[in-house]
Amino acid sequence: MKNYFTSESVTEGHPDKVCDLISDTILDAVLSCDVNGRVACEALTSRGLVMVAGEISTNCYIEIPRLVRNLLKDIGYDDPSIGFDYESCGVITAIQEQSPDIALGVDTGGAGDQGLMFGFACDETKELMPLPIMLAHKLARRLTQVRKERMLTYLWPDGKSQVSVEYEGQKPKRVDAVIIGAHHAKSVDTKKLQKDIKKLVIDYIVPKELMDENTKIFINATGRFEVGGPVSDTGVTGRKIIVDTYGGYGHHGGGAFSGKDPSKVDRSASYMGRYIAKNIVAAGIASQCEVQLSYCIGVAEPVSVSINTFGSSKFDEEKIAKAVRDIFPLTPKEISQELNLLRPIYRKTAAYGHFGREEEGFRWEDTDKVDKIKSILK
């Protein structure tokens, strides 16, 4: 049997991603004026409605409805004919302060919750990410680009991509299937849309050498995608955690990122896991690396550190794990300092993946620990 792996991505206009963006926009607003603010904020959106709920402790005032409406306008929900627009939708808030029981542990430098987090890297792409998810993200970003730059004036904000890659052993061999769902106006002809998307999105992103006559391409496979966004599907923060990470490659601890400040190890420790795994692969220690970190609420140091190189390293994994503890700071406070997480950078993370985004300047994508890793292990 042939070996395949498939990953998907979604555009910023997808209902779940709208909610992730709302949550992280609110987090950025808090961090912009209060680096010690605590945020655990989630959103839900449906036809004509956005609801924001959660726990926020801060010394600054945040005008949440205004932030939500400005974001929806930026995404492209600015036309009533789409069925959902920033001016007419209702915005409801239900915000309270963080529990003082949690603050007892977090204020002293401990983790904001228990949990297990994973980081991953592999040498399939220059970003040291799995190829299926990188292609899926690039397709989704391109779909948004051709819409926002008015190359295709009939496109609307919602959209999805999916890529299936055939592997030969552990190495990508070819792209077997590409799926695009493009939200569009009623006026466009289906065949024209499919031709335009093939030329301006798929052919623009997927390398020709990975495509062949047997590559399957599906563009709006039902024929039409006129009804999209919150009109067609309820969105909730944290419902695209596989899209946010590695596209199903490796494990996931189950915790979402968006709307959580860095004291929540669901976010900060996952970023550190990626930072560690990427530096190990960049150092040539392994061609694949998965890092697991686990924490207890109120306790600073991780309960466990585990390394899995899937047989791709000549070094003992216990030795690699010991080197990780020696090189990388692993308490929530140290992670925030090392990765410079107390900044309003999170809206940019909320769509098109949190990892492999080297052009964004995210600190967890740096490979500045390579020499230290080599010196200890080699």
Image: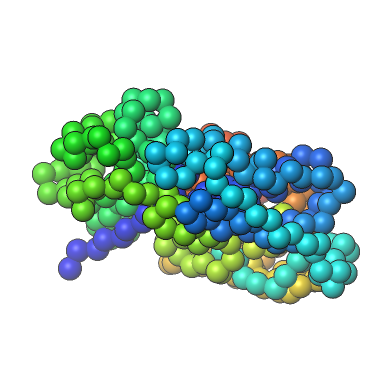
> Does residue 151 appear left or right of residue 112 in this picture?
left
Q: In percent of the image, x 76 and y 45: which residue is there?
A: 62
Q: Nearer the viewer, residue 6 or 127?
A: 6
Q: In percent of the image, x 62 and y 50: which residue is there?
A: 91
Q: Position of residue 106 (x, y in %)?
A: 83, 64
Q: In percent of the image, x 44 and y 39: which residue is there?
A: 80
Task: Identify the image quadrant of residue 276.
Answer: bottom right
Q: Position of residue 28 (x, y in %)?
A: 70, 43
Task: Relative to 156, say whether 292 is above or below.
Answer: below
Q: How is the image coloured?
A: rainbow
Q: Position of residue 357 (x, y in %)?
A: 52, 41
Residue 5 shows in this picture? yes
Q: Position of residue 219 (x, y in %)?
A: 23, 45
> Does residue 227 appear left or right of residue 59 in this picture?
left
- Count of labels shown? 0
Task: Relative to 271, say whether 157 is above or below.
Answer: above
Q: Nearer the viewer, residue 284 or 240?
A: 240
Q: In percent of the image, x 42 and y 52: which residue is there?
A: 231
> Quick one: quadrant of the N terminus?
bottom left
Residue 272 shows in this picture? no
Q: Nearer the viewer, residue 23 or 356?
A: 23
Residue reaching furthest to the left: 213
> Quick one: quadrant of the C terminus?
bottom right
Task: Identify the image quadrant of residue 142.
Answer: top left
